[in-house]
Image: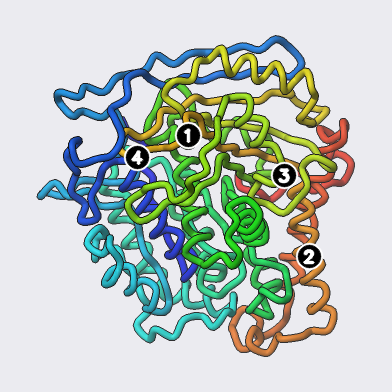
Amino acid sequence: MPREIITLQVGQCGNQIGSEFWKQLCLEHGIAPDGMLKQQDDCSGAPIVGGSSSAAATAAGPASAQHNGGSTINPASNFVDDRKDVFFYQSDDEHYIPRALLIDLEPRVVNKITHHSTHRDLFNPENLFIAQDGGGAGNNWASGFRQGEEHHEQVIDMIDRESDNSDSLEGFVLTHSIAGGTGSGMGSYLLEALNDHFPKKLVQTYSVFPNWDHSQSDVVVQPYNSVLTMERLTLNADAVVVLDNTALNRIAVDRLRIENPTVDQLNSLVATIMAASTTTLRYPGYMNNDLIGLLASLIPTPRCHFLMTGYTPLTLTDAAGQNTDTRIRKTTVLDVMRRLTQPKNIMVSANTRSSGCYISLLNIIQGNDVDPTQIHKALQRIRERQLINFIPWGPASVQVALARTSPYVTNPHKVSGFMLANHTSMAELFDRLLGQYDRIRKRNAFLDNYRREPMFEDNLDEFDSARETVQGLVDEYRACERPDYVDFDLQGGRGATGARQ
């Protein structure tokens, strides 16, 4: 039985990356822009035979692997063994419709997706929410949060209808930015509302962190919005996949050789990451085939749930899903796994080599001809060369899941890899955020618009509370690097106190 996931796209950024994500999912599952299933003959790529496998190795001991007995594709019947139902459902006329809600306080982006994009007929019109006045939140977290409260009933009714349409709902995925007004403010309100309304369901977010380069930052109050949102991400989300704009820009320029990357190109990069992180849910094997299984081993303590991603080899695709890069190189399992831990391929602007250590690490290797013994050898080589530093108080293990590739998409590379990791250098990113926040907060700059909102009418205590929460998160990530972390609570640290259990 599929474990369904409902996607909430909030604000301009959330809807833009969500739109690209659905385009990628449609390509990988052979779904046409109108929601109808393509015939196998119309799709690129040959049917694959074989299944998926999973391997795990412990850095301190011998490599070990477990092979998932896989299923096959029968070309005669055009049957593809995938799970479209996790993210889509079928209407009465056999159209596939995303389990997605498009939420914004101003109409421009949602209207562009539903009226002018190639996938305008894909979404359920009842799942679109645009505030009636259409004025947006004006890059003000407090305004977005207040309007979230005002529209609570309407949005929760839409979520309830989607959840009632699921047989076995596993959780929610929220896509948003932490720096603007709607994605940060209304997104924060929705995180709290989901916790209250669905206390036993998982909440994972794909959160876009702003570019801190002053020459590229266009929102002067983004440190305020970011710190206020970070508090809700720390206390109300089960897992946060960090998408750092600074790192995304660097990768587009350095790795993809794009001089001035456009928003669409960066969103395409994000969509690749999002689709890769859900591969084992949509093309399942025996392990990592649901969200809880994917996240459980990555998050040992409730508050340290901010995950970084890596992907290699990086390419950009056009609208038809064809690779636009003509420079194809030879890929091997060892080469891919080594590259995944290199800072230049990681989507967070923090140095994972020179500082900090891995709390947990999952590599998803995609390829149809990958032998598990290749994974054993690669893990052994990585261990011998001590390429990865792990926490001193937990198991030093690299988990590896071997996933099938989509038969509908032609991949020019034999092997590609995706990394999902929990690393203590995430504290660097949060420290940078707090530095920017302190710089404008100590002067009480740009606070007039916040004071006009009910939450900040009487005092600014909410800012101080949010900063304290983020500082506690930084302290806990730094404490993870020490052998005595298990006594963190007893030593006056914050530990998991107040976090969602």
In the orientation shown, which residue stands out farthest toward the front? Answer: 326
C-alpha span from label 2 to label 3: 22 Å
- Please state which of the two labelled residues, at mark 2 or mark 4, is closer to the viewer: 4
* Residue designated by label 3: 343
Amino acid at the residue labelled 1: His
Is residue 199 visible in this depiction of the protein?
Answer: no
Look at the numbered disc 4 and give the secondary structure of its residue: loop
Amino acid at the residue labelled 3: Pro
- Please state which of the two labelled residues, at mark 2 or mark 3, is closer to the viewer: 3
- Please state which of the two labelled residues, at mark 4 or mark 1, is closer to the viewer: 1
* Residue designated by label 4: 409
Circle 3/circle 4 CB separation < 8 Å: no
Above or below, 490 against 255 in this view is: above
Q: Residue at x 24, y 60 (%)?
A: 124
Look at the numbered disc 2 and give the secondary structure of its residue: helix
C-alpha span from label 3 to label 4: 28 Å
Which comes sooner in the sequence, label 2 or label 1? 1
* Residue designated by label 1: 413
Look at the numbered disc 3 and give the secondary structure of its residue: helix
Amino acid at the residue labelled 2: Leu
Above or below, 444 against 412 in this view is: below
Which comes sooner in the sequence, label 3 or label 1? 3
Circle 3/circle 1 CB separation < 8 Å: no
- What numbered label is drawn on residue 434? 2
Amino acid at the residue labelled 4: Val
Crowding around mark 4 (Cα neighbors within 10 Å: few <14, some 14 to 19, many 20+) is many
